[in-house]
Every structure is written in structure tokens, then in C-alpha cells.
Image (cartoon, rainbow, N blue to C red):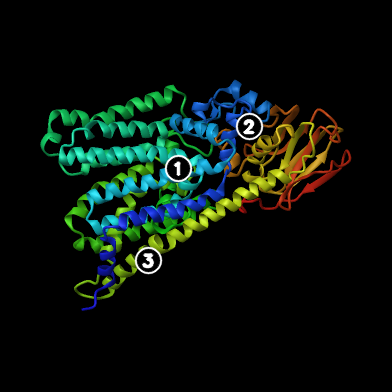
Amino acid sequence: MKTSLPDRAERWLCHPRFFKAVLLVALALAAPTVAIAFYSDDYIFLCYLEGLIPGSPPWYDLYNFFSGDPRATQARIALGGMPWWADPELKLHLVRPLTSALITLERAVFGHAPLGYHLVSIALYVALVAAAGGLFFRVLPRATAALALLIFAVNESHMNTAGWISCQHLLLAALPVVLGLLAHLRYREEGWRPGRYLGPLGLGIGLLGGEAALGGAAYWVAYQLLGPAPEGRAAGWRARAASALPAVGLLAYFAAYKAFGGGAANTGGYVDPLATPLRFATAAAERVPILIGNAIAAVPADLSNALPPAPFVALGLASAAGVALLYRACLPAVPERERAALRWLVPGALLALFTTLGGFPGARLLLLPNLGIAPLLAVLVLHGLRRGASPGLASAGRRAGAGLLAVVHVVIAPILFVAGTRASADMARKIEDVARTAEIGAPPRKRVFLAASSDPMASMYPPTIIALESPDAMSCWSMLSMAKAPHRLTRTGPSSFTLAPIGRTMLTGAFEALYRAPSAPIRAGFQVAQCGATIRVAEVEDGRPARIEVDLGAPLEDPGLVLLAWRDGKLRRVAPPAIGEAVELPWSPGPIGFF
């Protein structure tokens, strides 16, 4: 008798070596990420550790990007460590001491050789896949657990986590939390006494890695509320007291986080739910569907930072509705063990999703939410592909939906993982090329003024690469405008000029708003000193600069000055026009292509 595809697939999934095979697949997918080498924020951390950026944080607090101290901010602005338009009370302090210590150790051991950093990330990722497999095989039937593990391991949204050194905080947060959750489940279900304490310990270590560990705590909460009732020793008063430890620990964590200065404020990119709950709720209404669309349909959430978000929101809502309908159609065939697991894994995933919403929407945020989403997808694929007792339109629709999920998450996902690795490696090389071909000239140290460059990869990150590779090349770097528009530069004196974007204002892009929230308008007459120059806002529209006046404090022809603009794929010198004359700086897309 001919067996069906689902039956054959289950036999493969139940093979005793399938677990190890998935770990090898995860390793094979993650290994090529060594080609990415250093990328964007990685250079910032290296500059911090070498004291090359004004106001660099200490080694144990590398994710303290902006402290929120007005005096410190103004000092950094003056020295070119932040854009001139940065809010004086700008704060972006992510408390991740364990990750900061790891990066510091890696730099001490590997120096400027990125291979060692990547090998650490790859090892952590494979270990996390193994831990996730331990969880899945504990709470799900073997075939379903195996498919969930495969879906988790090859998920394209994990590429940045496995391959971007700056994302090691996600791995250091997730791995101990998942291991702690496993220990807690073993305690609850078997009475394994060490699990009473190893569970909270895992959560605590994860929180030292980064606030992403709150996503793991979400599963803990969901299991406590919606999971099976404890039995035996795990049901006693001591057990109930031990179960309360994570809640007490989370309160202590939030208190310590704030006491240490952690949080975000006065930035358009990050939202602190404790400081601005209403703004967080507004952001969540947009970001949750975007991330769900990425998790279910592989619609890249990162693109919503560069493109209008409405289509991403619509696709996310449609994906969620489709999965809900498919689960309803599959429910009669889903055994109780799988239902019981999904009763807390899926709410845990949604809670974990909410813990990620403070940052820019991006696939990297789905690492811990996928711990609950992967089992749901596995259940839908295995039961949705089976033929129903009464074939018909509904049965065909169910099988089509399950087949689509299988194609997206088993066939296409690893391809996207590899493609994402290649794209990131290509982007990393482009950023390095931008820095190395910037027309700064030979030392002595120059004051560099970037008149116009809208792409962060051609404005924010090149100076960190230049500082690391050629410490004597420049003394200061000033970004004058990141507006996505052509600009008109009009010389008004020997050392002065005006700069105006044509057809739009400044501070409308996502990365411009990173340094100043839209709720903090700039008034005409606002003046800042930076890199020995004076920058004054001369004209404003809707609270955003439309024209600035710049006096460099020395003639524009001074050999110690460099005036650059992004043109035709390079940071090129701008020839100063004669006094009273203007030059137009055309816009062209940067390395990302959208900015």
C-alpha cells in the first residue's frame, strides 16, 4: 500500500539521528556567516574599546550608546561623536554587561580578526538550537518536535543573530533562558529538585546578557498560568514559593536596570515602555503585525524601516488571520498533547513578541518568539497536509495552506538564510569600501564635514572604520545632513555657507529620528558648535530644519578641512564655489539602496 507524503515525512522526522542532523544543518547554515566579518555596529564597539569615539562607555557597558546626560551629550556633539541635531537629553542605554564582557574578551583574544568572534556566535547559535530541541522534544510528540526543531534551526530571521557580532546579546540572553526553562519544566513535571533553582538562575544569567531574555520570561509566565498543573513535590508550598522567584527577580531586574541608567528617551527609533507607555502602545499596534508577517510569511520586517509600513502591517494581519483559520481547520486532528503545549507556547510567543517592540522592527527580534511559533507551524504543517475523511474545498484549502507554510519554512527559509548571509557580507564590504575610498586625503588629521549623505552606511559607520584603520586621518567628523534629497550649498563668505535639502526638510528619515524624536521640534536660531564649526538653523518647516548656516571657522580652501558629499557611490570632495554662488549636490542611493 502506497504511503502518503505526511506519513513518509513522519518516518524521517522520527529517525533517531534526525536531531543531530538538524544540528549539522544549523552549523552548515551559520558557518558561512564568517564571511560577514565586522559589520556596522561592530566597528563602534571596537572604537569604544580603543577610546576612539568621544565619550566612549566603559568595557562592561558597551551598549550605552547615549547616556541622557545633557552635558555629556553636548561634549560629544562638539567633538563630532554625535550629529549636531541630537537631542541634548537623548538616551539609549541598553544594559547588557555579560555581552559587553564577552565582546571585550573577544577583542582581547582576537583583536581585529573577526573570525574568532564569529566562531563564538556560531557555537552559541548551534547550542541554542540544541536547547530549543530539548524543549520541543519534551513537550511535543517526536515527529512534531523534530519538525519544529528544523523550522527553528533554518529560520531565515536567525541569520543576523548567528552572523552579526553585535547581535551576540540575543544569543547570550536566549541560551541560558531556554536551558533554565527546561530545568523548570523538569522540576514541575518530574520533581527534579535542582530545577527549582536552575530555572531562575538561567533567567538571571540571560538578563545579564540582554533585555531580550524577557522574552524567555514570557514563556515562564505562560507556562505558570496555562501549562499543566504541578504534581508531587512540585505542587507543595516550597515549590509555589520557588515558582514566584522569577517574578520577584524580574521586579529586581527592572529596578536595577533603571538604577543603572538603562532605558531609551528622546529618540524616534527606540521606545521605552516604562517611560512612555502610550507611545509604546501606538508603536506596538504597528510593529506587532509587521513582526508577525515576518514570522509567518517571511515578509522582511527590516524593510519597514525604509518603506511605508502600511503594506507590511496588512500582510502581517493577513498572515495571522490565515494561520488562525488553518489552526481551526486542523484542530479536530490535533492530539491533546500538542494542544496542551500550544496552549502556553503560543501565548508565550506573543508575550515574547511584545518584549521586543522597543527597538527598530527587524527579523533579529524574532529569535525567542520563534521558540513558540515554530511548534505552531509544525503542528499546522503535519496535520494540515493530511487528507480529510471527506475531501472537498475545505480540505483542499487546508492542505494548500499547510503546504505553503511547509514550502516557506522548510524549503525557502534556508535559501533566504544563505541569501541573507551573502547580502550582509556584501553590505559589509561596501561599507568598508566607502570608508577606504572616501576622498579625505593624506594626514595630517583633517576636520571632515559630510554635507549630504542619507544612507547610514555611508554617513554613520565610515568614520568608525577610518578611525580604526587610519587613526591620523581625521580629527573630527560632522554629519551636516542625512536628508534623502538633493541639496543646495550656497557659499556666503570665506568660511561659511548655507545648506538646504531641495523639496523636503531634514530629520524625516528613520536614522535621523534616531537622534531626535519627532516630538522634539527644532526652532529657527538653534545653534550648535561642532568640530570647530558653528551650525545654525536658519529656516524651519513643521519643526524640522529646512536650511542651515555653517561657519567652519577657517576658509573653505583650508587644507585642514574636507567637505564631502555622497555622489555616484563614493564620498567625494565638494569643490567650494565662489562667494555668492551655489552648487547643487544631487542625491543618489547609498549602499542599502533605500536611503
Q: Which mark is residue 404?
A: 3
Q: Position of residue 293 (x, y in %)?
A: 42, 55
- Nearer the observer, disc 1 or disc 2? 2
Q: Looking at the picture, tell me which residue is in the foreground, 276 or 543.
A: 276
Residue at x 55%, y 55% (from the top left corner): 422
User: How far is disc 3 from disc 1 in space, using C-alphas?
Assistant: 30 Å
First in sequence: mark 2 vs mark 3 = 2
Residue at x 23%, y 48% (from the top left corner): 138
Q: Residue furthest right?
A: 578
Residue to which mark 2 is pinned: 82
Residue at x 51%, y 55% (from the top left corner): 420
Residue type for callout 1: Ala
Residue type for callout 2: Met
Instruction: Note whether 142 is above or below 238 in the view shown.
Output: below
Q: Secondary structure at mark 3?
A: helix
Q: Is residue 459 left or right of residue 231?
A: right
**Rendered image quadrant of residue 17:** bottom left
Q: Position of residue 313 (x, y in %)?
A: 44, 53
Instruction: Note whether 14 is above or below 528 in the view shown.
Output: below
Number of other residues with Cα within 10 Å of mark 2, as a class: few under 14, some 14 to 19, many 20 or more: many
Instruction: Note whether 401 is above or below 242 in the view shown.
Output: below
- Nearer the observer, disc 3 or disc 1? 3
Residue to which mark 1 is pinned: 283
First in sequence: mark 1 vs mark 2 = 2
**Rendered image quadrant of residue 283:** top left
